[in-house]
Structures are given as C-alpha cells and as structure tokens.
Image (cartoon, grey):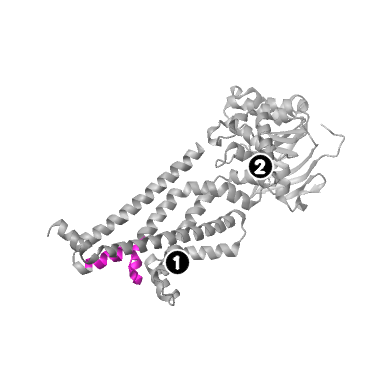
C-alpha cells in the first residue's frame, strides 16, 4: 500500500481525522486550563512558603502547603489522575473537568517550587531597600520581588508548561479522548500504527515548538525592557 | 553640632550577637539633629550592624535607641519609622525592574500617597541635585556604579527623611566614581538632614563630619570631633588604623 493510500485510510476514510481533531481540542483545553490553574495555585503556594521562609510566620498554612507538595510531587501523575477520577470526583461526570483539576493540581506543585526558588533567589538587598523606604512586606513582595522572580523563572515555567502538555497524554486512562487516545482509536480501527501515532507525535511536537517560541519572544521582550 | 539641644537620637547599652559572635557589645551614642556622624573602624567591628539598628533592619538583643524621645521598642509601626529614616546601601539596591523615575517615585506614591505628578516633580528636582536629570527614563542596568548610587540617594531623599543612613556608600564603586558620590553627600551636609555614615573614606569623614565614632570589636573606642579623632587621639589602636588606611598599602 502506498503512502497516499495509507494516509487516506488512516485519516480520511470514515472521517477518521475527526478523532485527532477532537482529541487535539480536548488536549488543548485540558492543558490550557490546567496550566492556568497550576499557575494560580502554584503562585499562591509559593508566596505563602516564601513568606514563611523569610518571616517565620504562617506556620500552619506553610505546613499544609508542604504536605501538599510532598504528596503531589511524590506520586506518579498517572496514579493521581486515577485517584481523582475513581475516588475523589467519583460523582463528577465531566471527565475533562476532572482532568483539568488533576493536572492543574499536579502542575501547581512544580510551579510552586519554581516560583519560590525565584523569589528566594532575588537579592536580600532588594527586600531591605524596599523595607527601608517604609514599605510593608507585601508591597515590596508584589512590586519589587515578584516581578524580578517571575522574569528569572520564565524558562523554568515554560518547561513546566511543555511537560504538562505532554503529560495530558495519559488522559485516556480515565476514558477521555485526548489527542493520544484519538490516534490510538484510529490505530485500533485500521491496524496501522505508523500513521496515527507518528501523526499524533508530530502534532505534539508542533505545539511544543510553538510554546518554546512564545517563551523566547517573552524573554526577549523582558530583556529589551531593561537594557 | 548643636550640643545645646537634646539629642534627636540616643543610643544606650546597645548589644547584638549572632550566635556566639558578639557584634555589638554595649554602645552609647548621642546624635544631634542635623548633624553628620561618621562611623569608622576596621572591618568586622560592627559598624554596619550598628547602623542597621537605626532603621530596625537589625533588632538589638538589649539596650535602647530613643528617637525624638520615643523608644524603638515601643514603636509598633516599623514602616512609619523607616519612612523617616532613609538608607543608602553599599550595593545600591536599586530596583532593576523599574526605571530610574519609577525607582524614585515608588515609595512617595505608594507610601506617602503623593500624586504621581507631585512625586515626579520632586524626583526631577532630586535628579537635578544629584546631576542625573537626563537619566529619568533609563533602567538601572544602563547606569554606572556612581550613577546608581546617586539615584539611590535621590530615591532615599524622595521620602524626605529626617535621618539618612549610609552603609559604606562608596565601597562597591570604581575609584574614579567615588568622588561624584561623596560630593552629593557633602552637599547634603548642613541642609538639616541628620546623617550617619559608615565609611572607609577617611578624608571625606574628616571634612564632612560633626562627629566621628571609631568602632572596634563591637564597641565605640572613642568618639569626638574629626580633629580629635584624626589628629589628637593618642589611642594606639586608632593611630595604627589611621596610619594604615590613610597612608595606604605602601606602608605594609
């Protein structure tokens, strides 16, 4: 069978490309909203943890954050999404929502440590300068420290976004059709692995490449602002 | 120096240690309003730690600092005190994420609640005073060390502090830039602002100070007029230190 025939059989016959399209749509929705959720929660956890690191206050909140980080970074994402779907959200029928929450919480744990690292890496002198002008801790944190920290951690956050996007490929395990599952469905129908799986891989590759480009642009822009 | 008045700041029995290390072991000082006090002495003698007690970046273990009759330990609003006691750091500590203008107006706008227009007007005047009126719209990364430190001084002055603390303001500068910063500080002397300056620039300390404190091993070995410390003191420790730093390393 020629390449064109295989292509036609796997993607065009019976509109099989729709599996990929729908799967891609779900992958994008899950990855996008999980990323947003992860950034928000991760950011809050990082601020709480670094506040505790710097001042010794918020002991209980810090302990809760610490337990959360230990659990989520200490167990496989795969197991987490199964637990979320079959135990925690057993009554929720919206699989996409469950996946968003599961991946979001997972990603947040990594984002939190990335952002906290960035905050702690900003020179102490910056804090002292802000405080010495009569500012309270929070004002210095949000106006001075966090902008510098975020700029420093953009490459690491972009890396996390890429990891998250690729990790959503296990969504199929809760019976959800993401891009990977879509490709696998085609494979199971045509008994032809090459076309759908390589095709699916190429689509991931293009998305990751796009994300890297966006990061590069963002970094360049931030640097231009300060030189 | 206005010795006839009650001192603005009174320090009594100030002690501070980090673990086993006694950094300050009992310091008594009076600072008169509007005076310039230089703190000199060898490295590790506790000069910077002492200075940082004045804006509560360090908390002493015991002893008191009284500011206009009020004991520091009774001050609840540390930020309010700090707004009145400015600080200039060795490493400048300008905010790299803000332009020069934003660095200067940040605290007046956010803390003093000045309008942006008013704060900008002030900032332009201050930049003029430190000779950098053309640098308002650049980021600190574009400035030389001397320029950064002058902006840092303008930033501190924008809060209109009563007291200004200088923590080795020229120690991180290339030699050719030290003069421009010292000149700015000299111009401030006599404007009514009270200044405490930790410095290794002996000629500068001699010219600008009303009072010089010589610190060694966490105590004030001697204090007095610049003439006294630099010329008349017979303390062997002070004489040895001064001959080393004033004559430079060629004697060693």
Note whether residue B54 is visible: no
Horizontal relation, residue B104 to residue B229: left or right: left
Picture quadrant of residue B35: top right
Q: Position of residue A141 (x, y in %)?
A: 59, 50
Front position in the image: B61 or B80: B80
Can residue A201 be spotted in the picture?
Answer: yes
Contact, mark 2 vs mark 1 (Cβ under 8 Å): no
Q: Quadrant of residue A99?
A: bottom left
The magenta-colored residue range is A167-187
Residue beneath the point at 53% across and 35% down: B141
Label number found at residue B101: none
Q: CA distance from mark 2 to mark 1?
A: 43 Å
Front-most of residues A147 and B29? A147
Quickly name the residue at label 2: B116
Pinpoint residue B68: horizontal percent, then vertical percent. Answer: 81, 44
In the rendered image, which residue does mark 1 sit on? A101
Instruction: Estimate the x, y position of residue A42 in percent, counting from the top left.
Output: 50, 59
Q: Nearer the viewer, residue B251 or B52?
A: B52
Residue A168 in magenta? yes
Residue at mark 1: chain: A
Chain to which mark 2 belongs: B
Task: Say which residue appears at 59% left-offset and 57% top-offset.
Answer: A52
Element assignment for label 2: helix
Name the quadrant of the C terminus of chain B.
top right
Q: Mark 2 vs mark 1: give the one in front.
A: 2
């Amino acid at each position: 069978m020629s390449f064109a025939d295989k292509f036609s059989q796997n993607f065009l016959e019976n509109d099989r490309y729709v599996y990929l399209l729908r799967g891609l749509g779900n992958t994008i929705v899950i990855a996008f909203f999980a990323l947003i959720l992860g950034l928000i929660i991760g950011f809050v956890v990082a601020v709480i943890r670094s506040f505790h690191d710097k001042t010794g206050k918020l002991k209980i909140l810090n302990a809760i954050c610490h337990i959360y980080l230990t659990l989520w970074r200490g167990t496989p994402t795969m197991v987490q999404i199964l637990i979320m779907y079959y135990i925690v959200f057993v009554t929720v029928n919206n699989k996409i929502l469950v996946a968003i929450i599961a991946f979001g919480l997972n990603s947040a744990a990594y984002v939190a440590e990335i952002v906290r690292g960035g905050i702690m890496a900003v020179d102490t002198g910056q804090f002292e300068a802000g405080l010495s002008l009569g500012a309270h801790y929070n004002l210095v944190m949000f106006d001075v420290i966090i902008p510098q920290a975020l700029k420093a951690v953009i490459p690491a956050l972009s890396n996390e976004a890429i990891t998250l996007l690729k990790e959503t490929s296990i969504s199929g395990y809760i019976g959800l059709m993401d891009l990977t599952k879509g490709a696998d469905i085609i494979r199971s129908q045509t008994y032809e692995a090459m076309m759908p799986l390589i095709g699916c891989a190429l689509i991931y590759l293009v998305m990751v490449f796009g994300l890297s480009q966006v990061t590069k642009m963002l970094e360049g822009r931030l640097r231009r602002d300060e030189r | 120096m206005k010795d006839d008045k009650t001192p603005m700041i009174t320090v009594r029995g100030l002690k501070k240690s980090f673990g086993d290390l006694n950094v300050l072991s009992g310091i008594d000082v009076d600072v008169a309003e509007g005076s310039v006090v230089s703190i000199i002495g060898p490295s590790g003698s506790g000069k910077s730690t002492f200075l940082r007690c004045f804006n509560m970046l360090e908390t002493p273990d015991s002893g008191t600092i009284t500011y206009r009759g009020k004991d520091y330990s009774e001050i609840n609003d540390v930020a309010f005190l700090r707004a009145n006691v400015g600080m200039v750091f060795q490493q400048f500590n300008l905010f790299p994420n803000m332009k020069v203008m934003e660095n200067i107006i940040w605290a007046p706008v956010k803390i003093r609640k000045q309008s942006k227009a008013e704060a900008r007007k002030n900032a332009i005047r201050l930049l003029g005073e430190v000779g950098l009126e053309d640098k308002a719209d650049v980021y600190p990364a574009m400035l030389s060390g001397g320029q950064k430190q002058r902006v840092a001084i303008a930033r501190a002055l924008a809060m209109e502090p009563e007291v200004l603390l200088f923590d080795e303001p020229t120690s991180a500068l290339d030699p050719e830039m030290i003069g421009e910063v010292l000149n700015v500080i000299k111009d401030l002397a006599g404007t009514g602002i009270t200044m405490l300056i930790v410095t290794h620039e002996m000629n500068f300390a001699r010219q600008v100070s009303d009072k010089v404190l010589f610190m060694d091993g966490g105590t004030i070995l001697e204090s007095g007029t610049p003439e006294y410390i630099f010329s008349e003191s017979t303390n062997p420790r002070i004489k040895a230190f001064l001959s080393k730093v004033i004559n430079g390393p060629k004697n060693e």
